Image: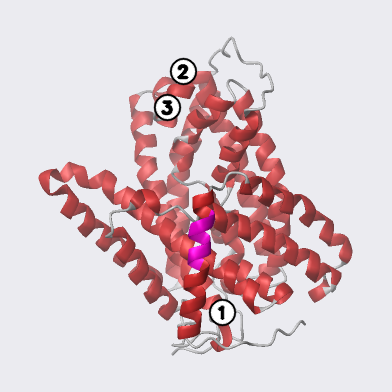
Amino acid sequence: MTGSSAAGNGRKEPRPVGAFSLLALGVNGIVGVGIFFVPADLARSAPGAGSILVFAATAIALLPVAAVLAILGKRFPEDGGPVVFARAAFGEFPSFVVGWVTYVSAVASAAAVMSGLTGAVAPSLGAASSLAQRLLAAGLVTGLALLVAAGIVLSARVWTTLTVLKLIPLVALVAAFLASRPPLPAAWAPTFDPSWLGAGLTAMFALQGFEIVPVIAGQTRAPERAVPWATVGALAFSAVLYVGLQTACVVALPALASSRAPLAEAAGVLGGPLLARVVILGTSVSSLGICMGMMVTTPRYLSALAKDGRLAFGIDRFGSRGVPLRALSITWLLVSALVQSGTRGQLFALSSVAVIMQYVVTSAALVVLALRRFRGLVPAQAWIAVPAIAVGFVLAGGASSREALVAGFAILLGLGLRWLAGARPTAVTAR
C-alpha cells in the first residue's frame, strides 16, 4: 500500500535505518572517487606537509556546517534535509529553489559518476565499447533503481557493505604507511603560501557529502541522536582518513604533484603491487558506492518538494518499504537519459552551486528558527551558523559564472515544471 505522506510525516511504520548505517551513508557520501586523485592536486598548491595541514584545517573549517546540520537534523525527523529546513524558516519559494537545484545537481552528478564507472569498464570489451558502455550504464541505473525500490532496509545493507569495502584499501594504505615508517622527505616542513587557499577549496569539495545524512532522517531510528552523531562523525572519520592518506602520499612520492594516480602509486611504494591493485579496484567500488547512495537519497529531495500535494501526480507518496516510488521512477528516467547522452564532462555543472545553496540557506535557516525558538531551539545556538555561512561564501569563490548561469536556467525550468505540475501553496505551520 502507498500513502500520501512521506516517511516521518505521519507514516507509522518502524524506522529501519540504524545509527551505524546512517554513519556509513555519510562516509560513503564523502569518500568518493575524488580522494584517489586529490592528493596530487593539493600537492601542486601546497607542497610537502602543507597539503596535510590544508586537509586538517579545512576539516576544522567545515565542522560548523556539520554542527548546523546536526542541530537542525535532530529536530526534523523527516526526509528532505535542506528542503525541510528552508521551508520551515523561509516558506515555499526558497525551499523550492534550494531543493530543486539540489535535486537537479544530484541527478546530473549521479549520471556523471555512473557514466565514468561504466566508461572505465567498457573499453575492455573492444571495438563495441561505445555501445557496451551505453548498455552497461542503462543496466547499472536500472539495477540500482530496482534495488532501491526493494526497500530502505536492503538499501541500507548494500550501501553499508559498499562503504566498508571501499574503505578497506584506503585503511590498508594508511596501515602500510604506519608499518613501513619511511623517512620524511627533506622538504617536509611547510612554508605558508597564498596558494594554500586554492588548495583549501579543493580539500573542501573533497570533504563535502556529509550533508546527505539528514535527507533520510525520516527513515532513521532515534534521529535526535543518530542524525547528529552520523553527520559530525562522517566528517570527522573522513578527515582523519584523508589526513592519513595525504601523509602517506607526501612521504612515499617525492614527485606527488605530478602523479596521475597518487593513491595507487603510493600503495605500490609502501605495500607492493598487490596493494596497488587493491587500491585501483577500490576506485570502482567507491564509484559504485557513490552511485548507490545517490539513488537512495536523490529521489527524497523530489518527494520533499512534493510533500502534502505541493506537486501533482502523487510524487510525495511512499511505498510500504520506505521508498518514494514515484520520485524514484522519475529520477531513474532522468539519470537514464543523461547517461545515454554522452556528455559526462558537463554533468557536474551544478554541483558547486548546489552545495553552496545548501550550506548557506541551511545555516541561515538555523538563525531564523533559533530566534523563533522553533522546536526547542534557542537564540544562543544561532552563533554556529555564522562560520558555516562564511564557509558557503568561500565555496562561492570557486564557482564559475557558467555554473551560476546553469543554476539560473535550472531554477527557471523548475518553476515552469512546478506550474505545469499543479503546484499549490501550502501554509507553513511552525510547531
| Disc on res. 255 | 2
Q: Is residue 29 above or below residue 244?
A: below
Q: What residue type is labelled 2?
A: Ala
Residue that label 1 marks: 7
Question: Which of the two discs, 2 and 1, labels the residue nearer the N terminus?
Answer: 1
| Residue 16 image position (x, y, % from top left) | 54, 72
Q: Give the range drawn in magenta.
A: 404-410
Using the rendered image of the protein, determine whether residue 359 is visible from the camera's viewpoint.
Answer: yes
The residue sitting at 28% across, 54% down in the picture is: 342
Magenta residue check for 426: no
The residue sitting at 56% across, 76% down in the picture is: 304
Front-most of residues 350 and 126 = 350
Question: Which of the two discs, 3 and 1, labels the residue nearer the N terminus?
Answer: 1
Quadrant holding the N terminus: bottom left
Residue that label 3 marks: 267
Q: Is residue 130 above or below residue 152?
A: above
Task: Specify how the rendered protein is coloured.
Answer: secondary structure
Give the prevailing secondary structure in the magenta stretch: helix
